[in-house]
Image: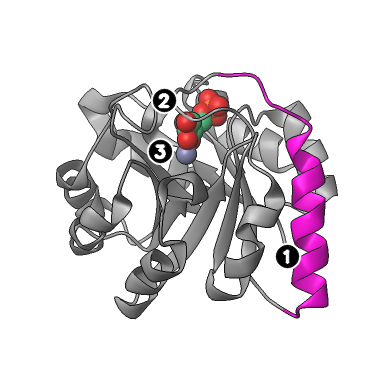
Amino acid sequence: MSTKIAPSILSADFSSLREEIEDVLEGGADYIHVDVMDGHFVPNITIGPLVLSAIRPVTDATLDVHLMIENPDRYIQDFIDAGADILTVHVEACTHLHRTIHMIKDAGVKPGVVINPATPVEMIKPIIKDVELVLFMTVNPGFGGQTFIPEVLDKVRKAVQWREELDLSFEIEVDGGVNEETAKQCVEAGVDVLVAGSAIFNQKDRASAIQKIRN
Ligand code: DX5
Ligand code: ZN
């Protein structure tokens, strides 16, 4: 199966979000990655359910929503109502991770768990059989355009091993600093889905940017 590409709209031109999304989808994107930041869990503030619900009618493509917010339980229903297909929560932000993941699952949305670069991979082990996606941050979340942290790939390899041993089928995604060079290392480590923001939206020709990352 070929590697999926999920452009992060954080680096898109927000004054023409519809065209930006259509452009990357025509260019071969598989998912649209939506970065939600609250100014507490991460230092930046981005978008909320209102913008997600504006994007929803633009496409049938999978909306991969990455919640970088404190107390995500409070907003999960809002993001589900707004049209999320995948809803990913940080292990560092959830006091009752199992409950949160099951809230998402029970609502018929695909649950994902995301882990920061400095958090040990063992933190996600108890939940991996309940999720459909494991997202490894390859930068400290908060901003686009940061430098890839290669040590995270050891954690990716561990997740690949657990998935095999336990006969599970969750997808493995990485987010942060992905470009044509780092993408290669990720795929070699076993990554299924590559999130890329600046490496796609900062290029004029999005189809060729996506192609380069995929290759
Ligand atoms: C970082 C976000 C990423 C970000 C990636 O906190 O979660 O999705 O947009 O941007 P690049 O690809 O530019 O590192
Ligand atoms: Zn993200």
Is 58 drawn above or below residue 203 in the view shown? Answer: below
Question: What's the magenta region?
Answer: 146-167
Q: Residue at x 21, y 63 (%)?
A: 77
Q: Which of the two labelled residues, at mark 3 and mark 1, occupies the earlier sequence position?
A: 1
The residue wearing badge 2 is 11
State whether label 2 is within 8 Å of ligand 1.
yes
With 187 as the anchor, is 21 left or right in this view?
Answer: left
Answer whether labels 2 and 1 touch (C-beta < 8 Å): no
- Where disc 1 sits, the SS reads loop
- Total count of labels: 3
Q: Give the quarter of the figure containing the C terminus.
A: top right
Amino acid bearing label 3: Asp
- Where disc 3 sits, the SS reads helix
Q: Residues within 10 Å of mark 1 (few under 14, many from 20)?
A: few
Q: Residue at x 69, y 34 (%)?
A: 212
Q: Residues within 10 Å of mark 2 (few under 14, many from 20)?
A: some
The residue wearing badge 1 is 1
- Where disc 2 sits, the SS reads helix
Is residue 49 or residue 121 the one in the foreground? 121
| Image depth: mark 2 or mark 3 in front | 2
Amino acid bearing label 2: Ser
Is residue 134 or residue 94 the one in the foreground? 94
With 54 as the anchor, is 2 left or right in this view?
Answer: right
Residue 202 x, y percent position in the rendering = 49, 19
Asked if residue 205 can be seen in this view, the reply is: no
Amino acid bearing label 1: Met
With 114 as the anchor, is 37 left or right in this view?
Answer: left
Query: Tag on residue 23?
Result: 3
Residue 141 x, y percent position in the rendering = 49, 30
In magenta segment, residue 158: yes
Query: Tag on residue 188?
Result: none
